[in-house]
Image: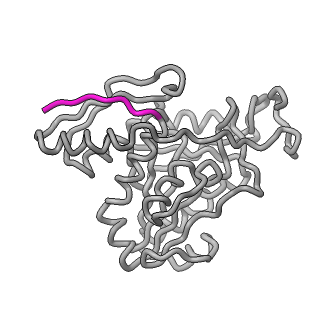
Amino acid sequence: MLATFTLKVPESKRLIAKGIAELSEVQQAMNGSKVIIAGGTTNGYIAEELVEDEFEKENYTAGIVDKGAACVTPSNKRINPVTLQNGKRTDQNWLEFMEHFTDKDIFIKGANAFDDKGVAGVLAGERKGGTIGRALGILVARGSSLLIPVGLEKRISSVEVASKMVGIDKVDYSLGMKTGLIPVTYGKIITELETLEILFGVEAIQIAAGGIGDSNGAVTLAIKGDETDIKKAMDLIKKIKGESKLKSNKRLCKDCPNPCNRIKG
């Protein structure tokens, strides 16, 4: 059986979050190990699925692309990354929590780009590399799991090529915050396609992208499989249809200590 459907960006984020929550390694970690859900809007959806609580997902991040510019969210509104021990939320700072990570533990970090070679890209506007810059060495050295949830609208031709072109100090003129792009070859990328296979065992491919209005960034997918699995998948798709869009939450230009070349607003 074959079915097609279109997902708007918030719907894709919700779908991916449900897939991450059902991964066997995540389920195991929730029952005996540690999980860190780093900042990021998609990760805000994942936090909701794992903690079973609502979050202001537009505040569950630091760096953000909003109003046509790379920027940051206001520091006084940011929600700290969730740390989970045996499925229970802790109050510990994620950096301190990570000091005790082993190969049984999981770090979840979204991306700003990925390519068909399996490389993810994370924008870094902080000079020490931000969250991924601080976490990656520990994860690789200890063999901890890194899960990278990312929507198909973020696919680019080559993360490696893009990362070599940019860098905070390389950029001369920017309509938005200057950033580098950190390539991440370690970890497991989870898009809508992998999610549909995880949840329903169906074959999924992307057949189109884009739209107008609130369908900007939408992806159109086709899934193929047994009738029972397709119907289960489509039941979930219908349930997540209408997922609310995230609110704009960029820091005001007047509050920026390092103004860019963008028109103020």
Q: Please identify the quarter of the rendering in which residue 21 is found.
A: bottom left
Above or below residue 125? Residue 82 is: below
Above or below residue 123? Residue 223 is: above
What is the residue that sits farthest to the top in this orientation? 212
Instruction: Give residue 61's position: percent from left, percent from top.
Output: 63, 52
Q: Is residue 208 magenta?
A: no
- In the image, 13 versus 247, the foreground residue is 247
Q: Is residue 3 magenta?
A: yes
- In the image, 173 versus 141, the foreground residue is 173
- According to the image, what is the colour scheme of the structure? one colour
Instruction: Give residue 211's position: percent from left, percent from top.
Output: 47, 21
Q: Could you tell me which quadrant the C terminus lies in?
A: top right
**Residue at figure coordinates x 43%, y 56% from the top left:** 147
User: In the image, is 220 to the left or to the right of 260?
Assistant: left
- In the image, 236 versus 3, the foreground residue is 236
Q: Please identify the quarter of the rendering in which residue 177 is found.
A: top right
**Residue at figure coordinates x 66%, y 54% from the top left:** 129
Span highlighted in magenta in the image: 1-8
Q: Main secondary structure of the magenta part?
A: strand
Marker count (numbered): 0
Instruction: Give residue 200's position: percent from left, percent from top.
Output: 22, 48
Instruction: Give residue 50's position: percent from left, percent from top.
Output: 43, 64
**Residue at figure coordinates x 43%, y 59% from the top left:** 49
**Residue at figure coordinates x 32%, y 40% from the top left:** 237
User: In the image, is 258 to the left or to the right of 128?
Assistant: right
Q: Please identify the quarter of the rendering in which residue 247 is found.
A: top right
Q: Could you tell me which quadrant the N terminus lies in?
A: top left
